[in-house]
Amino acid sequence: MSDRLINILLTSFTKILIPGIRVTIPLTLLSFAVSLVLGLLLALVLVARVPVLKTVAFIYIWIFRGTPLIVQLFIIFFGLPGLGIMIEAFPAAVLAFGLNLAAYNAEVFRSAIDAIPTGQMEAAYMVGLSYPQALVRIVLPQAFKIAFPSLFNNLISLLKDTSLASSITVVELFTSAQQIAARTYEPFALYCEAALIYLVFSTLLTWLQSWLEGRLVWKSHDSRDVTASGRTRSMVGL
Amino acid sequence: MLSVRDLHKSFGDSQILLLRGIDIEIDKGEVIAVIGPSGSGKTTMLRCISFLEKADSGRMEFRCCDDKAKVEEYDMHRATPAEIRCIRRHMGFVFQSFNLFQNRTALGNVMEGLVTARRMNKKEAEEISRRMLAKVGLAERADYYPGELSGGQQQRVAIARALALDPDIMLFDEPTSALDPELTREVLDTIRELASEGTTMLVVTHEMSFAREVAGHVIFMEDGVIVEQGTPEQVIDNPTQERTREFLRKTT
């Protein structure tokens, strides 16, 4: 490897990393927040079988899962101005990624809620809880635990998909790599460098996931030694 | 205290009849055991009484203790959500599969109804809940999650959860069917103790000896009708109906 290439890689590293931290990560987190809120609302509408809204949710998911993300991105950024709606590149990207992932997260939430045995709801009713109370206090916390790995999966996907924002002029991690590659004629090295930075980000997320999952367990003890009956494993129901 | 008249229930839209005109009457302090083969409609009956399932028709009279003079009558098919809430306020239900809230400790399970539904302050609710857990012999398991408890312990927590709300009647849906014999005993002991305290109970069970010992009245059901009922001596020891005799021959 020539000195020139090493020099390019070293000087470009921060030039790629900084937009990564300043743009890619906020873009990912904001879009994900939008997708969580909207996805949960869509799932609740589906689970509660709210008339009319249920159909709306179904059509929403059908469209956003059934069309390419980059097409949605282009419609929002390049298409909407034609209808008089101008959105800046960054908010347009947040909107496109958020709306798109909401459709996926809605399905994650819905299936997780469906996975909670109906007995939980029935027991909640019999101690006097209303439907919303039972949902919020009993069903959703359990469903969230089931949904968690899939949601995190989607988060990691999203992190990488934000590179598509480069196509609507958002200067994020990949855009920076593209610019430097065009200037230095070293596309192989620079795109590998960009890939490496994405890899570092997603590795951090993976660590975060396993740490959080470890805390999402309903146990009062470090289960191994002490359990209810004093045995190494509890008997029924585990 | 609670009576049900002419309860009918069919399955879905089809013509499969699960309950074909059930009449039940329970007085305060009475323990009724409901026995019968699988598919006879015992559980469905209990679920209709607690409105977990909607009956096709039927009338319920339920005297709630806080207003002794008044006897309310309810249409079991058309009961409004408000009526159902009111009825359930006075009922405790114990499920075959426990149905403890998996995201709550034993204490949290017992407290949930008091705090969320009854809006009791936490301190008072905790005091009541701890007393109820002690009553079922699980005071030292208060901080355990359901997954860390044995089946018998889970069912006793479930009983404490129902008792904490001070119900007028306890409904038990095969409370020991999911348990092995050893664990069955600890749960039955708990129910036996409630009976001795004069708790009104309607117990669907497969435990003949338990029904004989604890219940004042035994109902034998088959194919959605009550075939025979009376004292345990009459129904279990000297059944008059051939179907009852046949069922008891198979189970004992």
Image: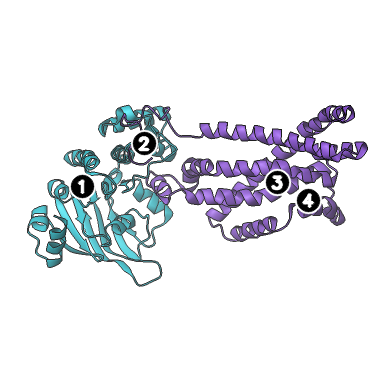
Q: Tell me the crowding category of disc 1: few under 14, some 14 to 19, or many 20 or more residues within 10 angstroms, Cα based.
A: some
Q: Tell me the crowding category of disc 4: few under 14, some 14 to 19, or many 20 or more residues within 10 angstroms, Cα based.
A: many
* Dots 3 and 2 on the same chain: no
Identify which residue is drawn at 66% across, 41% down.
A156
In the image shown, does B136 or B167 lie closer to the viewer?
Answer: B136
Q: Residue A73 carries which label?
A: 4
Q: What residue type is labelled 3?
A: Gly
Q: Distance between the residues labelled 2 and 4?
A: 50 Å
Q: Name the residue under label 1.
A: B28
Identify which residue is drawn at 64% across, 34% down.
A205
Q: Distance between the residues labelled 3 and 1?
A: 58 Å
Judged from this view, the residue extending furthest toward the right is: A183
Q: Name the residue under label 3.
A: A98
Is A155 placed above or below A114 here?
Answer: above
* Dots 4 and 3 on the same chain: yes
In the figure, the shade used to draw chain A is purple
In the figure, the shade used to draw chain B is cyan
Q: Name the residue under label 2.
A: B110
